[in-house]
Amino acid sequence: MDAMQYDLFQQQAIAHVNRGHSVVVSAPTGAGKTVIAEHVIRDCLQRGRKVIYTAPIKALSNQKYRDFQAIFPEQIGILTGDVTINPRAPALIMTTEIFRNQIIEGERALEEYSWIIFDEIHYLDDFERGTVWEESLIFLPDHMQVLGLSATIPNIDELAGWFQSIHRRPLQIVKETKRPVPLHVSYQCQDMLFDDFNKLVKKGFHSPEVPHLKGRKIPRFAYVKPNRLIPLVRYLTSEDLLPCIYFVFSRRRSEHLAEEVLSFNFLSDEERNEILDLFDELSQRFDLTAEPSAHKIRPFIERGIAYHHAGMLPTLKEVVERLFTSRLIKMIFTTETFALGINMPARTVIFDELRKFYGTHHENLKTRDFYQMAGRAGRRSIDKEGHVFCRVNPHFISPNDLRRIVFGHNEPVCSRFNASYATLINLYQTYAEKLYDIYPRSFHYYQENKRSRRRALEMMYARVKILKDMGFIRKNQVTAKGVFAGKVYGYELLLAELYEQGRLDQLSMQELGMLITALVYEPRKGAVKPPLSKSARILEHVTDKLYQTIYKYERKSRIKPYTPRCHFHLSNAVEAWIKGQTFAEALKQTDVDEGEVVRYFRMTVQVLREILDAQISDSLQERAFRLISLINRDIVDSERQLRS
């Protein structure tokens, strides 16, 4: 992009970068933040410097790898735990977890990198993973400059102030509040369309007159007309408001809604032939021609309809994404991950509902999340405005809550600092008892009051006490068990106990695969565990006993969240896969969605690679190495997918 074509906020950010200053950019979804990241990468490569780009999810890391590889051929690498391509590249893409781990473990290789780009830096507010971003910023090496890219957040000055207070160097702030394509929000309620919020409240939030109840007193909302999808889709078609991204917070519902609109055909004969040719070509490239799920979605594709969610095969999701960017998909029903950083705008966005699951419970959408998704409406240089439709049910949301979501201010980013056992172990190796001095450097300390600070510090002391009581630290030294635990983030206590007991050395390859898969698997609500083999039952008994020991320590210290227990729902499937059966045969052993099976097999590979980095016996090393090759094949192999 020519300098004259840059928007003002892009020019400002690039000017700061050119002066060698760290920068954090806060701008709406679709405003063009990636252009700044591309400038940093280009500038580093031209100057013979190295740069790291981090993303919050692997799907976004993979997308950026492809995008940047097209712009900077042969100069891009990727490192995400289950993918390692060109790891010594001058521009290296990785997940934020990988970057955090390398910093805390004192990787010398980071000395070669002069810039770090944190995409979606507002993920610092994520309840489960936000501490990873915070730890990355706390321990950022002095020689590295930062480019932080964020959705619009109101306390960007506070974030910058914290960074400057701990690193004693400036962090320039660039704010953009204006969207390049303005949004027009409309509502479907009681099967009527409203483009004015006040009219919606006046007419939509009252029970309609029901003929057979005429004259009777009925409670408010006793009868609510259902919002029908077909009239809404007809309206979009007649008003030329396609393509459309329809956000759904349920995998099954995304497919059901796609089935509901199968009576529509959004494509001309020429477009139909074009998209089927492209679909068949991509299916062949990604080895999907024999996959039942690819055959299932084909009738949707030929009508310009698609669905996209985490339960699908990763390769099939990628095919759908590529079809959408070809602009031949006119209506896609998708879960929210489609909104995260991936550059796939449309003319219209629809919200099926305005509530979602936030880690532990359902609640109304945050304004920030609403606009992260709504921001996909409106294609720059194509649309004069983006259209957003909220499907509203008065039973489930009040006018005030709806007003807050659509017209409220974005929520501030809050610290989620909660150092893991592995982080504390690695810090203890460097700082010993002085590791508690690190807490005042956290964003949590910067934001919170004395009471919250005291509680957070107590949690650090409590976790370290558990590590001492369980023998991970003795006489102010990290033990061999502790060193092992410091390599396996998230699964450290249980896996390290098995390591110390010598049980890992006693396991066959199948048993080791079942164990690691049980460690990483998180069952969805209502998941049914199949009958287990004898070896799986023995493993379940052993791990449950260890879990109870860990749970007692954590409960006594009031530490939350508790270390998760092992779940053996995928044991039969992973055993079949390790024995060389086809993916279709392995799937018969579980009711877990095929995309999730692939995801958990890939996570298993990642943990096995972390185990290989630890000091283990030659026999365990050989088994882990062979096991990786047995699991990481065909559709599970992420690198193969990226190279297709």
Image (tube, rainbow, N blue to C red):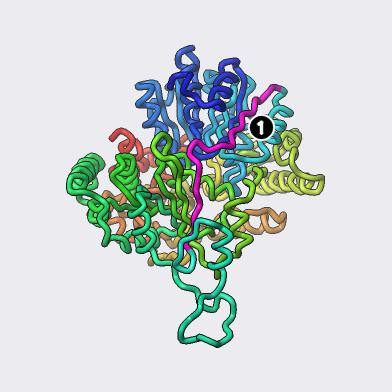
Q: Within the magenta stretch, is there residue 222?
A: no
Question: Residue tagged by mark 1?
Answer: 138
* Nearer-the-camera pick, 544 or 631: 631
In the structure shown, which secondary structural element does the residue marked by tag 1 occupy? Answer: helix
Question: Residue 396, located in which quarter of the rendered image?
Answer: bottom right
Q: Which residue is found at the position 62% from the left and 46% from the top?
A: 410
Give x and y (percent) for residue 641: 31, 38
Q: Tell me the amino acid under the disc marked 1.
A: Ile
Give x and y (percent) for residue 443: 70, 38
Which quadrant of the figure contains the C terminus?
Answer: top left
Give x and y (percent) for residue 250: 44, 59
Q: Residue furthest right?
A: 450
* Nearer-the-camera pick, 211 or 435: 211
Q: Within the magenta stretch, is there residue 184?
A: yes
Q: Which residue is found at the position 34% from the left and 56% from the top?
A: 573
Describe residue 157's horizontal placement relative to residue 285 as left or right. Answer: right
Question: Residue 271, located in which quarter of the rendered image?
Answer: top left
- The correct choice, above or below, for 388 with respect to 481 in the image is below
- The correct choice, above or below, for 54 with respect to 21 in the image is below
Which quadrant of the figure contains the N terminus?
Answer: top left
- The correct choice, above or below, for 25 with respect to 223 in the image is above
Q: Which residue is found at the position 52% from the left and 18% from the top?
A: 112
Q: Which residue is found at the position 35% from the left and 39% from the top?
A: 638
Describe residue 585's horizontal placement relative to residue 342 as left or right. Answer: left
Q: Is residue 105 visible?
A: no
Q: Is residue 496 visible?
A: yes
Which stretch did the figure color magenta? 169-188
- How packed mark 1 is, by other alpha carbons closer than 10 Å (few <14, some 14-19, many 20 or more), is some
Describe residue 431's horizontal placement relative to residue 176 as left or right. Answer: right
